[in-house]
């Protein structure tokens, strides 16, 4: 189940059954596999070798529903797109309430959703993408990425609900017909079997052609790049996604999702130390904080170079003045996560240095980028909540797009 550079298979949704669910009955088997501490032990396990074909089916699997209960009200209007890392959907009641009450979400034409659970205890063992599709009246395709062998990450261990399926991935929800689709496996920086949230598989980007009428197609890509890696590695992942769009109709392309442009290299302790030293020597502490809102200028430049080399633009597609996530040193869950990869002494120092900002600083991790499209009204919805519960650590981002007349010509 290692990532592959081979061109992924392309499927035509119109030729497939109207609905498909991704399911399995490996519950006890997954518990036994999770007991292995190292990948090499797992590979030597005869049971794992027997189960491997089924595991490959799952980590490369899709689910979908072609039905669109509530089509676009005005086919001539600009396309309304939103992207949101919904943090598993683990605060689902609040998530549902926010989406239902926000016109830019409930009435969106395209929803690029990342971090979606299917049958995970931490999110109530819901099929999060399917439930959100029903809520919004949209069709959907879900691309699975992982079979999760743990209750969750370091801050999600104590909910006490067993996983029924243990699946996690990304999805596109659409109010327009979806034609062909594929998913690109992204190269992993570290083996997630050894992560705190032990899992099999790898991140995948979902790419699909959307029929916008009059013979026009917009190809969209739902992207979630690796936070525990360098900017160069994130750029490598993104280049693989952008190369795959060429196999589809790539005259009009919209890429959206969580690019994890944190400006940090969290792939290793030495890399993180060098990264921090570089920042402080070059910009000082205050200047380093300001870089969080403009990652494209210095520390995440390789990611944006990958977009530019493919002819995609971010200018006009994003609200440049509003963060899409907040680094909040007062957040108990963030404290638990951060202490899992930085020394407590560094954390205490960081808390002191961020006191002038109230311990909260904005960052820009989530992006849209387009080619052959005219962007309109980019926006961010800050810290949406319901009943006093913040839905996700990320903010949803929005952009309306129109087809540009000068979309890339096809041979």
Image (cartoon, helix red, strand yellow):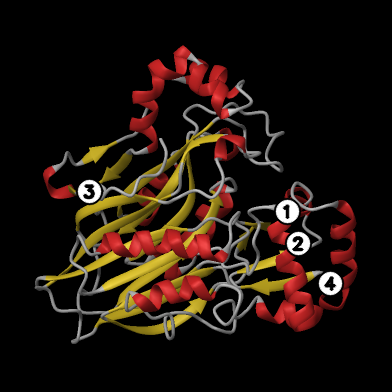
Quarter of the figure that contains the N terminus? top left
Q: Is residue 388 visible?
A: no
Is residue 302 or residue 75 the one in the foreground? 302
Circles 1 and 4, Cβ within 8 Å, touching? The answer is: no
Q: Which residue is mark 1?
A: 269
Mark-to-mark CA distance, 3 and 2? 48 Å
Above or below: residue 120 compared with residue 174: above
Picture quadrant of residue 251: bottom left
Q: Is residue 411 visible?
A: yes
SS at badge 1: helix
Q: Which residue is mark 3?
A: 66
How many C-alpha atoms fall within 10 Å of the one at disc 1: few (<14), some, or many (≥20)?
Answer: few
Q: Which residue is mark 4?
A: 354
Pointer 3 or 4: first along the chain: 3
Which callout, 1 or 3, points to the residue nearer the camera?
Answer: 1
Mark-to-mark CA distance, 1 and 2? 6 Å
Circles 1 and 2, Cβ within 8 Å, touching? The answer is: yes
Pointer 3 or 2: first along the chain: 3
Picture quadrant of residue 38: top right
Which mark, residue 273? 2
SS at badge 4: loop
SS at badge 2: helix
How many C-alpha atoms fall within 10 Å of the one at disc 2: few (<14), some, or many (≥20)?
Answer: some
Is residue 129 or residue 339 the one in the foreground? 339
Mark-to-mark CA distance, 1 and 3? 45 Å
Q: Which residue lies at the image location 26% right of the left edge and 63% below the top edge?
A: 245
How many C-alpha atoms fall within 10 Å of the one at disc 3: few (<14), some, or many (≥20)?
Answer: many
Which callout, 3 or 2, points to the residue nearer the camera?
Answer: 2
């Amino acid at each position: 189940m290692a990532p592959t550079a081979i061109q992924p298979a392309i499927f035509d949704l119109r030729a497939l059954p109207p609905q498909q669910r991704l399911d399995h009955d490996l519950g006890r088997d997954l518990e036994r596999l999770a007991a292995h501490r190292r990948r090499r032990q797992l590979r030597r396990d005869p049971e794992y070798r027997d189960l491997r074909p089924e595991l490959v089916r799952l980590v490369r699997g899709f689910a979908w529903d072609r039905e669109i209960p509530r089509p676009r009200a005005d086919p001539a209007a600009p396309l309304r797109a939103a992207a949101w890392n919904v943090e598993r959907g683990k605060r689902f009641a609040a998530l549902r309430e926010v989406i239902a009450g926000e016109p830019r979400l409930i009435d969106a034409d395209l929803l690029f959703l990342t971090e979606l659970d299917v049958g995970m205890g931490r999110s109530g063992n819901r099929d999060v993408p399917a439930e959100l599709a029903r809520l919004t009246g949209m069709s959907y395709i879900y691309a699975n990425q992982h079979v999760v062998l743990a209750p969750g990450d370091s801050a999600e261990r104590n909910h006490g609900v067993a996983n029924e399926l243990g699946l996690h991935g990304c999805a596109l929800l659409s109010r327009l017909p979806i034609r062909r689709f594929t998913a690109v496996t992204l190269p992993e920086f570290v083996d997630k079997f050894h992560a705190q949230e032990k899992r099999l598989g790898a991140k995948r980007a979902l790419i699909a052609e959307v029929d916008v009428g009059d013979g026009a197609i917009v190809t969209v890509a739902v992207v979630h790049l690796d936070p525990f890696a360098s900017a160069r590695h994130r750029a490598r992942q993104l280049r693989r996604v952008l190369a795959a769009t060429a196999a589809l109709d790539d005259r009009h392309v919209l890429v959206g999702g969580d690019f994890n442009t944190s400006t940090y290299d969290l792939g290793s302790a030495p890399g993180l130390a060098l990264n921090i030293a570089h920042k402080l020597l070059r910009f000082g502490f205050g200047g380093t904080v300001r870089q969080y809102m403009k990652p494209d200028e210095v520390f995440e430049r390789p990611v944006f170079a990958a977009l530019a080399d493919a002819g995609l633009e971010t200018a006009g597609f994003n609200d440049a003045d509003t963060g899409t996530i907040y680094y909040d040193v007062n957040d108990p869950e963030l404290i638990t996560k951060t202490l899992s990869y930085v020394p407590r002494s560094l954390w205490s120092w960081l808390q002191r240095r961020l006191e002038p900002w109230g311990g909260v600083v904005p960052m820009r991790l989530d992006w849209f980028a387009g080619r052959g499209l005219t962007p309109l009204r980019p926006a961010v919805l800050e810290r949406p909540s319901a009943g006093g519960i913040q839905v996700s650590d990320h903010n949803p981002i929005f952009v309306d797009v129109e087809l540009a007349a000068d979309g890339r010509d096809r041979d």
